[in-house]
Amino acid sequence: MTPLARTAAPAAALAAVALACALAAPAPAYAHVPVLEPSRSSDEVGRPSEPYPGAVGVRAPEVSLAVYGYLAEDELFDVYDFTPSEPVSTHVSILVPAEEDLGRFRPVVTVERATGTGARLVAEAASPPRRETFFEPFTLQTLYRGEEATVTLEAGQRYYLRVSPGSGGRRTGPYVVAFSGPERFGAGDAVRTLVRVPRIVLGLYGQAAFDPVPLLVLGAVLAIGAGILIAIRRRAGSRSR
């Protein structure tokens, strides 16, 4: 079973319900817009004018953003690119699910500016030797907290977001790149988030190997819940006769 899947498959349904309630609140907390890595590698190395030709395009961190990805065994790094439409001052950090087998996974995230002749480092955040944990209510996950770096981004400038394995004893696993910022959820963001949260809990993104067990467990939980509701309705109907 994949590391993220083991965080509790049945939590996907609970997370979706909790998220719906949170988004309905007038001022939701922890409202990071989630972005999921697609199921393809991005670690192609190019030429100076295009250093990362396989970069995955994502929205710019003009709002509070969380990028969920998975470093596979055969990947040197994951890389994304974005271009802000307005100046941005934000903080970036790298997070890892707090599980025993991920204790040695200490990825590093860098923000690099495209220069036309390569990429220049703007900021870097690593996973420290000792990491505190915190609970993330949207996905019902406990995460290792990484270092946080301040980032100033220019409007119209292309940037790369790169995640590499770091110096830990493990080089593969799930991660979350978190950007601070204003928590603005439009209607489209709310719908996309409701769809993505179950995928996050089940680990259905990035280069992680597909594991059907969490889906089977989730299906069983939903079937049991449906059976209980049917039994309650039947009992209530028999009493009303």
Image (cartoon, rainbow, N blue to C red):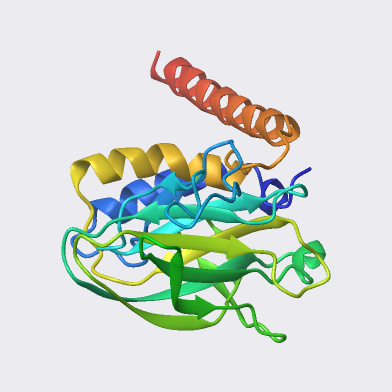
Residue in the picture at 59% in, 23% down: 227
Question: 148 left or right of 219?
Answer: left
Question: 82 left or right of 80?
Answer: left
* Among the 4 quarters of the image, the one containing residue 146: bottom right
- Nearest the camera: 235 or 177? 177
- Nearest the camera: 116 or 22? 116
Residue in the picture at 64% in, 78% down: 127
- Nearest the camera: 92 or 52? 52
- Nearest the camera: 209 or 168? 168
Task: Look at the picture and state if 43 lies above or below 192.
Answer: below
Residue 141 visible in image: no
* Among the 4 quarters of the image, the one containing residue 33: bottom left
The residue furthest top is 241
- Number of numbered discs overlaid on the protein picture: 0
Task: Look at the picture and state if 226 lies above or below 122.
Answer: above
* Among the 4 quarters of the image, the one containing residue 41: top right
Rendering coords of residue 118 (x, y %): 45, 63
Rendering coords of residue 28 (x, y %): 28, 63
Task: Look at the picture and state if 15 lies above or below 130.
Answer: above
Residue in the picture at 57% in, 51% down: 69
Question: 101 left or right of 161?
Answer: right
Residue in the picture at 58% in, 54% down: 78
Rendering coords of residue 68 (x, y %): 52, 53
Residue 134 visible in image: yes
Q: Quadrant of the C terminus?
A: top left
Rendering coords of residue 135 (x, y %): 54, 69
Question: 164 left or right of 148?
Answer: right
